[in-house]
Amino acid sequence: MSTVFGALNRFISRLDSESPSQNSRNASPYGFQILRNKNLDIPIEPWYDFIVGINGRQVDNPDPNLFATEVRNCAGSTVSLTIWSAKGNRSRSLALPVPTPSPTLGITLQWSPLAVTEDVWHVLDVIPNSPADNAGLLPYSDYIVGTPEGNVHGESGLGELVEDYLGRSLRLHVYNHEYAVTRLVTLTPSRTWGGSGALGCVLGFGALHRLPVPMDEPIAGPGETLFETARISTEERRPPSAQPPSQSPSLYPPPSSATQSSDLVLPASMTSPPPPPSQSTVTPTAGPPRGARKPRAAMASKMTFDDYFREGEQKSKEEDFAPSSKTTAPAPPPPKISKAPAQAKSPEPAVDGQSEGGEAKEVQKEKEVVAESTDG
């Protein structure tokens, strides 16, 4: 019993000692990467395309002999391949005929993870007279996908390679999106070219700088579904046996052709005669006649923009009381007088002495009148 428990403990410790990075690497999707295509009739691009399925089954075994056996079994017919492309991360199905004499496809494969195509650097900007400019790199349309000098992995992989080749010629595989071609570019990194950086260009790396879909593929039209998402609805799902109301069996069978004759009256055309007037009922007196509706001016069926603008201008003038050319001319101003009118003179104030003398005379007259009246 002790030996059994010891073997079990060693097995568990071996499982615990495995690194999680190795488990995650095995969990990533794999496929047969196309390294070389000798048959030009097969529309497969090296490095960009991966074979991830054959005859409706996923390729999960890295043994190339099993793949070759599956292809030979299809001799004289066609083999169906599922191709995954790094350009746009899309999959497509491809049916290829397999010849009988030599049942091969003429391609060279390598078992690789699909993540190797994520090591792509997008050229965003190129500084004039820099090593990148002299090599012919184009901004926005060029992507650095690899190098013949070795494998480059991670965001800092290209920078480390450039530092190793300072002052020496460096070859890079560059893919151009506009022309859909891959070319070999040779440049010489340098720190003394007169600007910042050893290449003199701005590079982008990450999910936003993956290889785009080729420009020759048709663009999705309006209303087409670009991404398939799960349909979420609060409506209750009907069982399969349920039928829509239009197809559900009716309680009353449809009328036969014999009953559909001319005496069949539809409900929409049924008219009932008015009831006979009775003696007890009193006919209501007719009310005062309603005023006739004012005729509304019908809008012209075809009005131009000038008509709309002219109508709006007329309304604004009426609201603002602005004078128009159709209104009567205003009254002319009064004529000018040549001679200025004489100014009225204000009465001169009376002198104090004169006013006192007048008052004294009036008092003397009053006394005389009083005296005459007493004498009489």
Image (cartoon, rainbow, N blue to C red):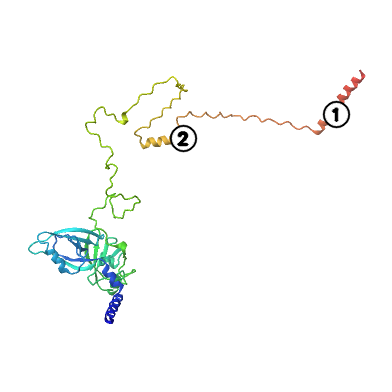
Please identify the residue farthest to the bottom as the structure is shown. 2
Q: Point out the image quarter for the C terminus.
A: top right
- Give the answer, above or below, for where 195 lies relative to 88: below
Specify which label sits upstream in the sequence, 2 or 1: 2
Q: Is residue 124 visible?
A: no
- Give the answer, above or below, for where 297 lies relative to 133: above
Closer to the camera in the image, 144 or 257? 257
- Give the answer, above or below, for where 144 lies relative to 371: below
Determine which of the numbered discs, if any, sits on residue 149 in the image: none
Question: Label 2: few (<14), some or many (≥20) within 10 Å?
Answer: few
Question: Label 1: few (<14), some or many (≥20) within 10 Å?
Answer: few
Three-letter amino acid code at disc 1?
Answer: Ala
Residue at 27 percent of width and 81 percent of height: 3
Q: Quadrant of residue 300?
A: top left
Left or right: where 121 falls relative to 373: left
Closer to the camera in the image, 21 or 49? 21
Q: Secondary structure at mark 2?
A: helix
**Where residue 190 appears, x then y in whole percent?**
30, 72
Determine which of the numbered discs, if any, sits on residue 317 in the image: 2
Closer to the camera in the image, 18 or 212? 18
Three-letter amino acid code at disc 2?
Answer: Lys
Residue at 40 percent of width and 35 percent of height: 310
Q: Point out the image quarter for the N terminus.
A: bottom left
Left or right: where 210 falls relative to 373: left
